[in-house]
Image (spheres, helix red, strand yellow):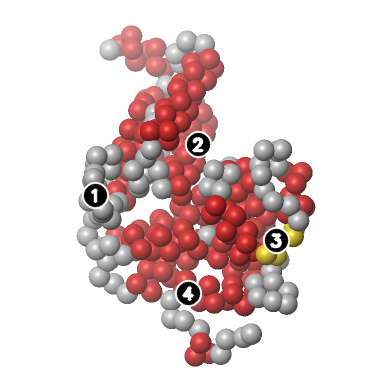
Amino acid sequence: MTASGKDWPDSPLDTVDTAFAQLTCDPAPLSLDLDTLADQLDDTAGLPGGVIALPALRQWLLAHPDAYTARDVVWRELIRRARVEGPAWVIAAVALAMPALRRYAGRLRTGWAGDAHDLDAEILTGFLSALQDRVDLAKPAPYAALCMAAWRAGHELRQRDGAEAMPVDNLEHVTGPRTPKRPYGHPDLLVRRAVELGIVDECDEQPYIDLRLGRRAIEPIAVLVGLEVDTLRRRVERIDNRIAEALAAGVLTEVTSPRVREDLAAAAERRQRIRAARSGGARPAAAQARLAAA
């Protein structure tokens, strides 16, 4: 089945869905052999084996949101194929991320007076730019990085066109049916919520805001906090990944369960123990000098 010119939808996201449907229909649907990924997975990853059609793979990923290792392996392969094997795999990668992209488009349309198709196009452009060039496959959570790029592109369009900011509710104490208000109109508030949930350590909040939101040079901030530049850079990159994963999972935008909050608190405690063990209780010389002068 092929679509005629008049059959193609106007929305960029709908167009991808139409193209994906054609790529995955019988008799030769676009598929992925998951057995070729087995050596990258541990025994608990739970990814099904064999050749699987991509719509079924998308359903499996949606049904297993906590299968982080499996998701990372699948997305590294999808990104690799999109970069080296041509347009069909580019469409496939976008289509597998479509539930998240549509969710972002719906949220960003709140208070948006412009053309919804323009917003869809900007989200898609951000995703494709990251897919083709920007996501480092050596780093964890490549899917989260793609989603972050898509969200950022759409959000920047809102900001450029002067859309109203989305106010922040107290997400932990709201009862009754509602459509949650999102904190993305104020990125510093998003970081504050990440701190409250333990995704970002409190001591890292201001350096992170200065570097990522204020776009300040890293060297003076590293001196101020008593860290080597490379150490601070790695720390900020890890925060980027944690925030991206939290955004992709809805942790920063939805009510979080007690179990999730406990897991985040435990992860924060582990980070503190690791930092304490690495430092051996000794402060860097620059920090000691500032304390002595205080």
Classify residue 29 by image quadrant.
bottom right
Which residue is at a point 56% across and 61% down the rendered structure image?
96
Look at the picture and state if 205 lies above or below 58. Answer: above
Query: As displayed, is residue 153 above or below residue 279?
Result: below
Could you tell whether 264 is left or right of 113 in the image? right
Q: Few, some or many C-alpha atoms within 10 Å of disc 1 (few <14, some 14-19, many ≥20)?
A: few
Q: How far apart are marks 3 and 2 (CA)?
A: 33 Å
Q: Kindly report which numbered mark, 1 or 3, lies closer to the viewer in this rendering.
A: 1
Helix, strand or loop at disc 1?
loop
User: Real-space Cα distance between discs 2 and 1?
Assistant: 36 Å
Q: In front: mark 3 or mark 2?
A: 3
Residue denoted by label 3:
52
Residue that label 1 marks: 176
Residue at the extreme front: 176
Q: Distance between the residues labelled 4 and 3?
A: 23 Å
Disc 2 versus disc 4: nearer the observer: 4
Residue drawn at the location 77% of the way across and 52% of the way down? 35
Question: Left or right: where does residue 155 sit relative to residue 135?
Answer: left
Q: Quadrant of the N terminus?
A: bottom right
Give the label, 4 or 1, closer to the camera.
1
Amino acid at pointer 4 = Asp
- Using the rendered view, name the quadrant where residue 32 is placed: bottom right
Give the x, y percent position of residue 136: 60, 48
From the image, tell me which residue sits under label 2. 238
Local crowd size for mark 4, using a 10 Å CA cut-off: few (<14), some (14–19), many (≥20): some
Rounded to the nearest whole Å, what is the CA distance between mark 2 and mark 4?
Answer: 34 Å
Q: Nearer the viewer, mark 4 or mark 3?
A: 3
Q: What residue type is labelled 3?
A: Ile
Q: Residue 14 — which label?
A: 4
- Of 220 and 115, nearer the camera is 115
